[in-house]
Structures are given as structure tokens and as C-alpha cells.
Image (tube, rainbow, N blue to C red):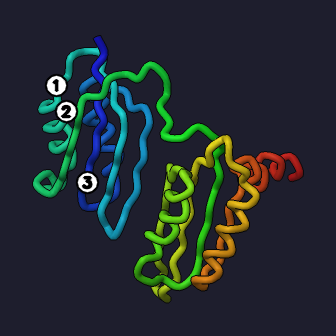
């Protein structure tokens, strides 16, 4: 029977760390499914679902990832893993349409809370989020949210832009298909 684990890794960033973590999973004959990886302030973070055909236990998985962190970083490598049953169907916190948001402007305390509060009180689920601050103090947020099916997105888009403007922030919220259509390089290649 397959074993599925939710795996989370934190380690000081360096070239090759994603390769080394994935090598540890592969060496145990594991397959990586969903994966999110980022570097925040010099800290490499990864969350993924790994499936193993043979009974790999949690401690073996943790030890393999820590051993492959390399460069003496094994002691600084934090690995969490939990067994995860295969869901009967893909679980979503909210059924609806996906939208892409972007917010930019001066960084200030409470900014992430303010944007996330806007979505939470309306029952809109944040699925992905990036927050970056430039050396000059400007902050950029972007990500994806799911707007529930029963909601009219037009007023939500207008309210989002207005509320962020009252805080001195420029904001956009648009359907993911609009984002894909305006950011797809495929048609550009056909013109070259």
C-alpha cells in the first residue's frame, strides 16, 4: 500500500538544496506530488506531498532529508513530516473561481493583516501569497484567492481597489483566466 506524507523542510538557503531534498525522497523511491518552495530572508522552505510505493516510515524519511541537506547544514535543517491519507477527491476550502491579486505601496505594520482580513471576512480563501519588500521600503503582495461561486466578483474587485487606496496602496484583483491570457508568451512566439 502506498504511503503519502506531507513534508515540510526549512534550512539555510544555498545552491542545490532543492536538488538535495528531492534526491533524498527519490532515493527512498518516493514521488513528489504537489510542491511549493521559496526562499524567505535566506531561509529555504519547502512543502510537498511525497508518495512511497514501499513502506517508508517517517523517521527514515526525516533522516534521509537531513542527511542530504549537506555542507554541515543537517543540524540546522528542520524537517516535519506527517502521514496523509489519499483524499477521495481533491479538497478545496472554498468552491468557486480563482482570482489573482496584487498590492503595492509603502510597507507598514498590519499590511498583510489588512489584505488577508479583506478576503477572510468575505469568505474568500487565500491559496497562495507572496510578500516582498524592496530596499527602498516598498512592499509587493501577490497571490491567488478563490471567490465563492455565489458571489458577484465585480463589487468585490471594486471594494478591494478602493479599500487598498485608502491605505495608500495600489491594488488589482482579476480572474485567473485574464491573468493567463495577458501573461501567456505562446502567442508572442508565433509572431516572431
Measured Cα–Cα span from mark 1 to mark 3:
20 Å
Residue 154 percent coordinates (x, y): 76, 58
Q: Is residue 66 above or below residue 50?
A: below
Report the side of 34 relative to 28 (left or right).
right
**Disc 3 on helix, strand or loop?**
strand
In-image side of 23 versus 105 (left or right) = left
Q: Position of residue 140 (x, y in %)?
A: 54, 73
- Residue at label 3? 10
Residue 172: quarter of image = bottom right
Residue at which label 2 appears: 61
Task: List x then y, in percent, for residue 115.
Answer: 52, 68
Q: Is residue 30 above or below residue 155?
A: above
Q: Earlier in the sequence, mark 3 or mark 2?
A: 3
Residue at coordinates 24% horizontally, 56% vertically from top-left? Answer: 11
The reply to whether discs 1 and 2 touch (Cβ–Cβ < 8 Å) is: yes
Badge 2: residue crowd in 10 Å (few <14, some 14–19, many ≥20)? many
Residue placed under numbered mark 1 in the picture: 57
Q: Can residue 185 be seen in this snapshot? A: no
Q: Residue furthest bottom?
A: 136
Amino acid at each position: 500500500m502506498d504511503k503519502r506524507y506531507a513534508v515540510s523542510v526549512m534550512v539555510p538557503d544555498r545552491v542545490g538544496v532543492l536538488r538535495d531534498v528531492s534526491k533524498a525522497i527519490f532515493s527512498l523511491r518516493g514521488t513528489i506530488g504537489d510542491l511549493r518552495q521559496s526562499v524567505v530572508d535566506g531561509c529555504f522552505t519547502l512543502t510537498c506531498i511525497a508518495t512511497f510505493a514501499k513502506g517508508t516510515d517517517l523517521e527514515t524519511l526525516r533522516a534521509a532529508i537531513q542527511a542530504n541537506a549537506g555542507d554541515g547544514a543537517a543540524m540546522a535543517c528542520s524537517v516535519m513530516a506527517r502521514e496523509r491519507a489519499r483524499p477521495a477527491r481533491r479538497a478545496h476550502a472554498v468552491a468557486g473561481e480563482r482570482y489573482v491579486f496584487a498590492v503595492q505601496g509603502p510597507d507598514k505594520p498590519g499590511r498583510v493583516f489588512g489584505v488577508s482580513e479583506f478576503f477572510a471576512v468575505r469568505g474568500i480563501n487565500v491559496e497562495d501569497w507572496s510578500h516582498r519588500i524592496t530596499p527602498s521600503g516598498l512592499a509587493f503582495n501577490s497571490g491567488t484567492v478563490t471567490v465563492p461561486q455565489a458571489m458577484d466578483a465585480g463589487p468585490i474587485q471594486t471594494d478591494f481597489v478602493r479599500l487598498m487606496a485608502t491605505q495608500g496602496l495600489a491594488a488589482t484583483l482579476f480572474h485567473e483566466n485574464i491573468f493567463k491570457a495577458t501573461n501567456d508568451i505562446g502567442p508572442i512566439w508565433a509572431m516572431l
